[in-house]
Image (tube, rainbow, N blue to C red):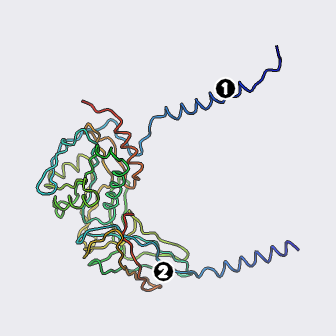
Amino acid sequence: MKSKLAFVLLLTIFLLSACGTTGEFKVMDAWARPAASGENGAVYFIISNATDTDDILLSASTDVASAAEVHMSMMDDNGVMSMQMQGSVQVSSGESVTFKPGGLHIMLIGLNRELKVGDTFILTLQFEKAGEIAVQVEVREQ
Amino acid sequence: MNKRLSYTPLFVLSAVLGVALVVGIVFRTPYTFHGTVIDPPLPVTDFTLQTANGESFRLSDAKGKIVLLFFGYTNCPDVCPTTLATFKQVYDRLGEDAQEVRFVMITADPDRDTPDKVAAYAARFNPEFIGLSGRLEDLESIWSELGVFVEKQDTGSAAGYLVSHTASVHVLDRNGNLRMTFPYGTTAIDMADDLTQLLKQPKQE
């Protein structure tokens, strides 16, 4: 009797987890460091893809800068840091990609206003499948 | 005499000795630096560069203080602000000891970074931070002496060229010698601990 119950329970869990793969596609915890007007800036966030399809980040745009580009900082064995522009960033199904200092970031080029701690602004990310996602970016120290 | 010796005092004694031994070993272990230690420390040739309002900064004027040298450029959006934000945390953690440390950013991009620009950029993180630029030949000799790699890179960015550069922080001790480097990503806690330790060491006369 008990084992039958356990079997049904297991089966239920299995079925639930099987149809649970179509979750949300979202961009979380977007932030930028303070920067002066005229300078460049960087935006960081986490893209979480809980859907069952792969997606690709294609581009970014914002009103606060003359251009927004996807960049990646990379350090070699000698401690030399280089930045490289990324054509696109793959966000596979069931995975999340973290944009963080010293790695992937959105480079804001030519800020047209000062970014002060506590300010917020909108960054629009263009994805191949998810389309346009507008995220609110918070300006903070870290 | 009672043949049944009580073992309790013996046990307590050995336990106390054991703990004392462990504590002794822990406290005798020399401090291990988080940064990459340069042993023996390397003397660094004196230099003069420019900061805000036409003023100059001479390295030897900072003798007696620890000097942190970071090489970056003001167009850099990611690594340079991250390092300066770490400097700011280090400054705060050090408390009064921060007065014994000079936080310096030297440009890796003199073509675009005027002394005023670098100075303003560094000061935005903390008014005590020093930003320096100068003639290319002066900068090049500093870069090469400290093994700092600098290279312009045209990546097709709307920002114009980017600059690849050594991102580690160079630590000059109070005698003006290169003593340590902090690789990029060293936490403020680790840097502050190392600096506090360095400040405990006596200055040479």
- The chain carrying label 1 is B
Residue A135 coordinates in the image, percent (x, y): 41, 79
Residue A93 coordinates in the image, percent (x, y): 54, 77
Residue B63 coordinates in the image, percent (x, y): 22, 39
- Is A113 or A99 nearer to us in this picture? A113
Report how far apart the C-alphas of labels 2 and 1 lie in the structure.
67 Å
- Is B147 or B181 nearer to us in this picture? B181
Quarter of the image where one finds residue A110: bottom left
Label 1: few (<14), some or many (≥20) within 10 Å? Answer: few
Picture layout, residue B129 above or below residue A73: above
The residue singled out by tag 1 in the image is B13
Specify the farthest residue to the top: B1
- The chain carrying label 2 is A
Residue B149 coordinates in the image, percent (x, y): 27, 54
Q: Is residue A1 left or right of residue A99?
A: right
Q: Residue at x 28, y 33 (%)?
A: B203
Mark 2 or mark 1, which is nearer to you?
A: 1
User: What kind of residue is marked 1?
Assistant: Leu
Q: Residue at x 20, y 58 (%)?
A: B119
- Is B131 or A55 nearer to us in this picture? B131
Helix, strand or loop at disc 1?
helix
Is any atom of residue B34 visible in this view? yes
Q: Residue at x 49, y 34 (%)?
A: B29
The residue singled out by tag 2 in the image is A55
Quarter of the image where one finds residue A127: bottom left
User: What kind of residue is marked 2?
Assistant: Asp
